[in-house]
Amino acid sequence: MASRYDMANYDSDEEREKYPQIPKKNLTSAVLFCVKLFNSKQISYTVTGGYAVKLLGGERDTRNVDMYVGAKMKDIWKLLESESCVILPQTKLLGDMLRIFVRTGPGWADSNACELEIPIAVNLVETITQGPSSVAIQSRRQSRVQAGLGRELVYTTGIFFLIKNKIAAFASYGREEDRTDLIFLMHKYPEKVIVKMEELDMEASKVFLDSIPPEDRAKLVEEIFEFTIDGCKPP
């Protein structure tokens, strides 16, 4: 059975002090646990956020995992209740978001050769209706993660959807991690933005562009927002 944690007394700063850096193996272990559980019940999902960026080659450290799930949260809760490596909130929530912790490390399922025992925060977002989160699952892409001696299939958010969401998030909250991810994604995958430029929120994009160093801003504006290659606009 899953154990419980008190949301009212949960202290993220205390957790950060206890675990200053989260190894990628532990994050991957938590992802694989969730993926296998959802696959066993034929529940669609997509991994998003910082871990998805990491799978695309990003080097920024991240401490948790974000996932969209194609099922009602009450059904996800029932599924998780029987899992001993899961830590659920003490109070059963009926909203469309749920933060759980997955125990990773020696002795736990999908330990993935982890050296440290660390509970990984996994943020689950319900997506069974029309809207941005359902689009995230529809536009998902295949990725591979290292698992023991092999590589496991994991679905992650499409690159453009990831960029679009992070632009909106940065405009709303101004988080440094979103800006770092955006600079990386736009430099590495400019073509993903160019082909769907009209779907971007230009006001939110301006907030992001105004926040970055002039040299990065000039290059992104030229290669993406003004769509030029080697100083020339394509015919």
Image (tube, rainbow, N blue to C red):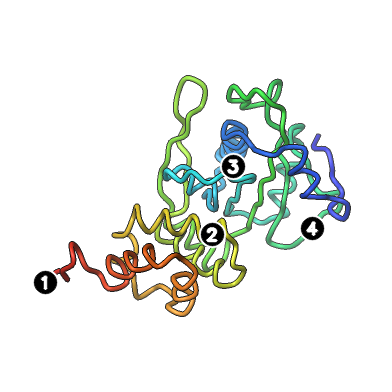
Tell me if residue 109 comes above or below residue 71 in the rendering. Answer: above
Q: Which residue is mark 4?
A: 93
Residue depicted at x 62% and y 54%: 71
Dot 4 or dot 3, earlier in sequence: 3
Dot 4 or dot 2, earlier in sequence: 4
Spot occupied by residue 200 in the image (x, y as percentages of width and height): 41, 73
Type of amino acid under label 2 = Asp
Q: Which residue is mark 3?
A: 38
Q: Which mark is nearer the camera, 3 or 2?
A: 2
Front-lying residue, 116 or 112? 116
Spot occupied by residue 46 in the image (x, y as percentages of width and height): 52, 50
Type of amino acid under label 4 = Leu
Dot 3 or dot 2, earlier in sequence: 3
Q: Which mark is nearer the camera, 1 or 3?
A: 1
Position of the C terminus by quadrant: bottom left
Dot 4 or dot 1, earlier in sequence: 4
Residue depicted at x 87% and y 49%: 6
Q: Residues within 10 Å of mark 1 (few under 14, many from 20)?
A: few
Please indicate whether residue 43 sits to the left or right of residue 77 in the image.
left
Position of the N terminus by quadrant: top right
Please indicate whether residue 24 sits to the left or right of residue 201 in the image.
right
**In the structure shown, which secondary structural element does the residue marked by tag 2 occupy?**
helix
Q: Which residue is mark 1?
A: 235
Please indicate whether residue 26 sits to the left or right of residue 199 in the image.
right
Q: Which residue is mark 2?
A: 178
Type of amino acid under label 1 = Pro
